[in-house]
Image (spheres, rainbow, N blue to C red):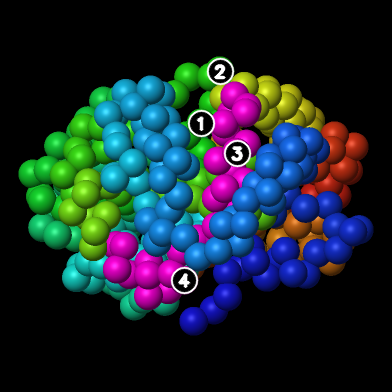
Amino acid sequence: MKRSYIREILDAINENTISFAGGLPNEDLFPLKQLKKASKKVFKQKNSLQYSKSQGLDSLREKIANFYTNIYALPTTKEEILITTGSQQAFDIILKSLHANNLVVESPSYIGALSAFKILKKDIKDFKTIEQLENIINKDEIFYCVSDYQNPSTYTYTKKQREKIANILEKKDAFLIEDAAYSLLNFQGKIKKPICKFYSEKSYHLGTFSKIVAPGLRVGWIRANKELIGNILAVKESLDLHTSTFNQMLLDAYLEENNIFKHINKNAKNYKKRMNYMADCMEKYLPNFQFKRPKGGMFIYGKFNNIEDSMALAKKALEQNVAFVPAEVFYFDEKKSNEARFNFTNCDFEKTKEGIKILAKLTK
């Protein structure tokens, strides 16, 4: 089992590196003042440092359930929410609660999910089109997808595609793991209904505060029906008993006093400017990189028309203190690719321009 390429890159970079690699939110947008105020409130409560419920803090789960009811138009109760230590943990506890050995994933797919699937020795199949999905998924197998601003491809399923996927899964009696890490980061503030809105019986919907508040808190969640929650709760207890009590109470206090959607919209507007600036630089200095501007999320994804192996380019770029992620790591069979993913949220405009210029020289 190899380490995640992106985590290795994050270990290797230093203060001199221009990094387009990890999916890092912009630190300048973290609500530090609000969280500091919330932390003072939480520290007055002794139970903030005590053990807590394995399923998660009641009041935090209630607030997350309200997200679904009011934002996704998917009526949800706190009993249908389980708090996880980051949404990354969700992959592990869901798969350990099911007997399925076969998974179907998008091609390309999120590296963190692929790593979680591989370490549990699951058999992975991939697909490019929804028509292919219908032909390869079978009863009680698992379909994993990122429905909005996919990591890495940035693609978003249309409503028609979501309904078709739901129909396929219902017909095949398969499981759905729907990763919604980026669903709220829409540049126009438009939130699509999740696939599980159309297929809820055997579905898990994953959310996280990492992309909308701060990743260092490591708080995510799973939305599923009560029976599925009961099954994964036993697995959760065997791993870490519960997610950090203090961090849950901190987020709960923050949400109590602040309008998180106002904060999310502020982030999205900032990210749209950063995305457009990076895209402008690519079009000007890196014309051989073909891509479409995303409508949300944190990445630009495309392909180099003048090179065959983006991994080789990534290694050369790192020697010049520029980091990006070659698409090879997003394919479960790690096939050679000329595609690449660039994060636009973490670099300032000056470094973004400098990094793209360095890549332009390396690709000539």
Quarter occupied by residue 78: top left
Q: Callout 3, which amino acid?
A: Ala
Left or right side of 147 for 51: right
Most extreme residue toward the left, as rendered? 171
Q: CA distance from mark 3 to mark 2?
A: 28 Å
Q: Which mark is nearer the camera, 1 or 4?
A: 4
Q: Which residue is mark 1?
A: 184
Q: CA distance from mark 1 to mark 4?
A: 28 Å
Q: Which residues are magenta?
A: 232-260
Q: Is residue 163 above or below residue 334?
A: above
Q: How packed is label 4: few (under 14 Cα within 10 Å), some, or many (20 or more)?
A: few
Q: Which residue is mark 4?
A: 240
* Callout 4: SS: helix
Q: Which mark is nearer the camera, 3 or 2?
A: 3
* Callout 2: SS: loop
* Callout 1: SS: loop
Q: Within the magenta stretch, is there residue 254? A: yes
Q: Which residue is mark 2?
A: 188
Q: Which residue is mark 3?
A: 253
- Of marks 3 and 1, which one's residue comes earlier in the chain? 1
Q: How packed is label 1: few (under 14 Cα within 10 Å), some, or many (20 or more)?
A: many
Q: CA distance from mark 2 to mark 1?
A: 10 Å
